[in-house]
Amino acid sequence: MARKRMTSLLLSALAMLAVGVAAAQAAKGKHNVSHAKHAKFAWHDSGTTTPIKHLVVVFQENVSFDHYFATYPYAANPPGEPRFAPKRNGFATTSSAVTPHQTVIGDPQPTGDKWDSRDNSTSTDPNNRNIGDLLNAKGVTWGWFQGGFRDCNQSHTNKGGMVSKDYIPHHEPFQYFASTANLQHLPPSSVANIGQTDQANHQ
């Protein structure tokens, strides 16, 4: 009798377990279908080939390569630290920071920027293209957000007590190219045009 009762309880438990597993699988399947439908519509609405809508890249000043890439395999200079001859990069030699080969080796400010205050240079080679040009060619919206770009008199005090201007012209790479420059620091014509080619030119 006890064995019969134990067998009955065991079969009941197994039956309940089977029902629970089936219910869980059904719920999981329903969730997956719902998730897949949601992902499908999200992809469709974004017009992209993946559900990713925005990519934000943050660069540190003067340390991007050393901090992010210098420990990658083959990132170090070859043994003996050979010298490399600079290529002609097509920048105006209107600054001592540009070599006779038209290669920028220092910090000239972008020519024409309304907040230029010293030596400057600009890209003169029509074949020079920056990443903004490449994104435009593919119809991808993009934007460059520079501290102090709207109000170039804006400043802040750092932890060391030093007061400095937020906008530094030679930190704004797209100002060196006529195709992506916004030399008068104009704002986007509307919120809808942020990242588009309007008077702000993606800035």
Image: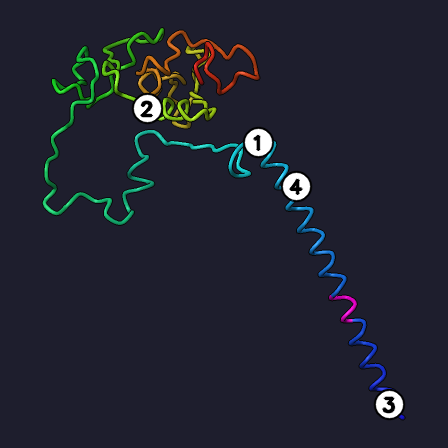
Residue 46: mark: 1
The three-letter amino acid code for the residue at tag 2 is: Asn
What secondary structure predominates along the stretch shown in magenta? Answer: helix
Q: Nearer the viewer, mark 2 or mark 4?
A: 4
List x then y, in percent, for residue 19: 79, 68
Please, is residue 39 above or below residue 103 in the view?
A: below
Q: Quadrant of the N terminus?
A: bottom right
Magenta stretch bounds: 17-21
Label 1 packing within 10 angstroms: few (<14), some (14-19), many (20+): few
Q: Which numbered disc, 3 or 1, marks the residue that appears first in the sequence?
A: 3
Q: Which numbered disc, 1 or 4, marks the residue that appears first in the sequence?
A: 4
Q: Which numbered disc, 3 or 4, marks the residue that appears first in the sequence?
A: 3
- State the residue at coordinates (33%, 21%): 173
Answer with left or right where residue 94 lies relative to residue 133: left
Label 2 packing within 10 angstroms: few (<14), some (14-19), many (20+): some
The three-letter amino acid code for the residue at tag 3 is: Lys
| Residue 18: in magenta span | yes
Quarter of the image for residue 201 reads top left
- Residue under label 3, please give it: 4
In space, the residues marked 1 and 4 are separated at their CA atoms by: 12 Å
Label 3 packing within 10 angstroms: few (<14), some (14-19), many (20+): few
Q: Nearer the viewer, mark 3 or mark 1?
A: 1
